[in-house]
Image (spheres, rainbow, N blue to C red):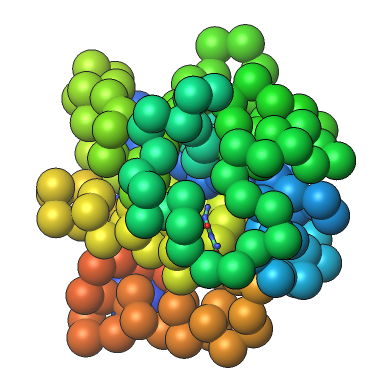
Amino acid sequence: MSAPLVPAEPSPFPVPLDSTALVIIDMQRDFLLPGGFGETLGNDVDQLAAVVPPLVTLLSAARAAGMTVIHTREGHVPDLSDCPPAKLRRGKPSIRIGDDGPLGRILVRGEYGHDIVDELAPLPGETVLDKPGKGAFYGTDLAGILDRAGITRLIVTGVTTEVCVHTTVREANDRGYDCLVVSDCVGSYFPEFQRIGLEMIKAQGGIFGWVADSAAVRAALP
Ligand code: TIU
């Protein structure tokens, strides 16, 4: 049987179900809710709210199709030994990584704010990958997890488009994975970065990936 084909840009993107994973990047309270890391950086977290409903629907479709699902979370161990000093110092946040905030210690593993928003809570059996950096490969076993599952193609969603989504997709592309970024299931605090961030992926013949909206992906799934 031939693989389902998503009408993507710059060209159709095949999604063979046994070798494609849905990757959901950093849909954590720390980025999406007031009082978390994103807000301490000076961002308007409301900008990310629109990502949740289409991603809930896409996640449900991927689960129904039996697709591998991988959730990531950006954050640090409680003693912050995996947080580079430069990341700790960067910017002028009101409170810094590791400080106490209304959602718990900012961007620290095990804290309420570090976990994934209720609407997208992982199911038992789904991989939840903790990562210290922006990319999902640095400091993690993502390559091994994908290799052992026979995954070579990624449908990438989550936040933020120009930071953790781009870092992950750029490295995935270098490592030989084909990546489809779902335009309405990724989000940025900056509308112009969202638009340009998506353009950058698919420009130059798809220089490091493909782009389609979630309706196109869902229509291709069984
Ligand atoms: N600040 C920002 O846009 N993003 C991050 O710090 N991390 C992720 O994108 N997950």
Q: Is residue 125 above or below residue 23?
A: above
Across and down, in percent, residue 172 comes to: 24, 50
Please give left or right for residue 2 compared with residue 173 in the image: right
Q: Which of 26 and 17 is in front in this view?
A: 26
Across and down, in percent, residue 216 comes to: 57, 62
Across and down, in percent, residue 10 comes to: 33, 78
Please give left or right for residue 103 compared with residue 78 in the image: right
Across and down, in percent, residue 146 comes to: 28, 28
Please give left or right for residue 145 compared with residue 105 in the image: left
Tell me the quadrant of the picture where the C terminus can be found: top right
> For the point 58% across and 45% down, which residue is it?
97
> For the point 24% across and 68% down, which residue is it?
208
Q: Residue 60 falls in which quadrant of the image?
A: top right
> For the point 79% across and 41% down, which residue is it?
101
Tell me the quadrant of the picture where the N terminus can be found: top left
**Residue 150 visible (yes or no):** no
